[in-house]
């Protein structure tokens, strides 16, 4: 994948003798088990198990490359560096440094009839942004379906809460694909409601304008996924047609 072709993603380069172990103790996937040349989707959570960021993670020899939304880059780097302390870990904004970014292994196949944002939506790949950071659990984003959530790798922030949800089956919301013919963009974090009601039953994760309106990834309470009566809270005349992923 050529990161330069995906304008909304920023490349970070992470190196250092302690990089693999440090990232393994922070992210939801088995970083130390990632072989050179491999790419995967991963996430970083807070101690309450809420997802702070999602990203593509690749390993080339002992260097890790991370692609995440541009809008989340500064916050991610600042917060991550707080946990480095005395570890030998260097986190660099490779885009700002104008580094030559290597060709990373393809994570998803691009779709010829749509842009990258729509491609990710159709593949069910959720990108966390500042408006949604800290709002969703990994299972609500179906990160386990993307091999972006390991239940066997050991400790990381929020791991106990996330594991408990798995065994107790208490995930009440789920990631869905949705379409609408309304072309007023529903931004990440926009609330969702049952048609004719005010209560909040979910939120937009990602959206992209298409020639037919827009396509979205949303997190929705399970009882409403098949009801066919979901609208944007701020745009009541914007009904969503919801499909499971």
Image (cartoon, grey):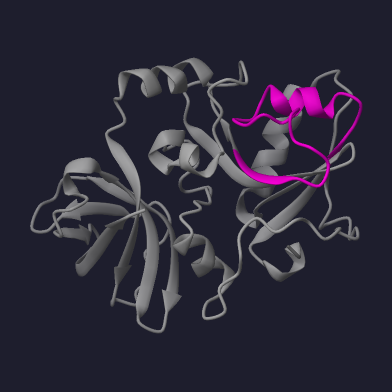
Residue 60 in percent (x, y) is at: 86, 45
Q: Is residue 227 visible?
A: yes
Q: Is residue 185 visible?
A: no
Residue 189 in percent (x, y) is at: 39, 51
Residue 160 in percent (x, y) is at: 48, 15
Q: Residue at x 38, y 68 (%)?
A: 215
Q: Quadrant of residue 188?
A: bottom left
Total marks placed: 0
197 shown above or below 213 = above
User: Residue 166 versus residue 188: which sits nearer the camera?
Assistant: 166
Q: Quadrant of residue 111?
A: bottom right
Q: Is residue 99 left or right of residue 10?
A: right
Q: Quadrant of residue 238?
A: bottom left
User: Residue 43 versus residue 77: which sits nearer the camera?
Assistant: 43
Q: Is residue 40 left or right of residue 227?
A: right
Q: Residue at x 67, y 66 (%)?
A: 6
Q: Is residue 18 magenta?
A: yes
Q: Residue at x 78, y 56 (%)?
A: 104
Q: Which residues are magenta?
A: 14-42
Residue 51 in percent (x, y) is at: 51, 35
Q: Residue furthest left?
A: 196
């Amino acid at each position: 994948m050529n990161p330069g072709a995906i304008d909304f993603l920023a490349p970070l380069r992470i190196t250092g003798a302690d990089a693999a172990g440090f990232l393994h103790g922070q992210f939801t996937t088995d970083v130390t088990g990632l072989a050179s040349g491999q790419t995967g989707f991963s996430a970083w959570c807070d101690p309450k198990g809420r997802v702070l960021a999602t990203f593509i993670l690749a390993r080339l020899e002992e260097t890790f490359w991370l692609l995440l939304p541009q809008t989340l880059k500064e916050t991610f780097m600042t917060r991550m560096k707080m946990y480095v302390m005395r570890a030998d870990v260097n986190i660099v904004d490779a885009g700002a440094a104008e580094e030559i970014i290597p060709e990373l292994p393809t994570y998803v196949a691009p779709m010829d009839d749509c842009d990258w944002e729509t491609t990710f939506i159709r593949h069910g790949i959720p990108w966390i942004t500042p408006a949604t950071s800290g709002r969703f659990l990994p299972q609500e984003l179906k990160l386990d379906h993307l091999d972006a959530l390991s239940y066997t790798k050991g400790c990381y922030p929020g791991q106990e809460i996330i594991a408990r949800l798995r065994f107790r089956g208490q995930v009440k919301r789920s990631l869905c694909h949705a379409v609408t013919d309304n072309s007023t963009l529903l931004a990440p974090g926009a609330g969702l409601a049952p048609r004719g009601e005010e209560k909040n039953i979910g939120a937009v994760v990602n959206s992209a304008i298409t020639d037919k309106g827009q396509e979205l990834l949303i997190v929705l309470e399970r009882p409403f996924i098949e009801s066919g009566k979901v609208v944007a809270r701020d745009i009541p005349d914007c009904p969503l047609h919801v499909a499971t992923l």
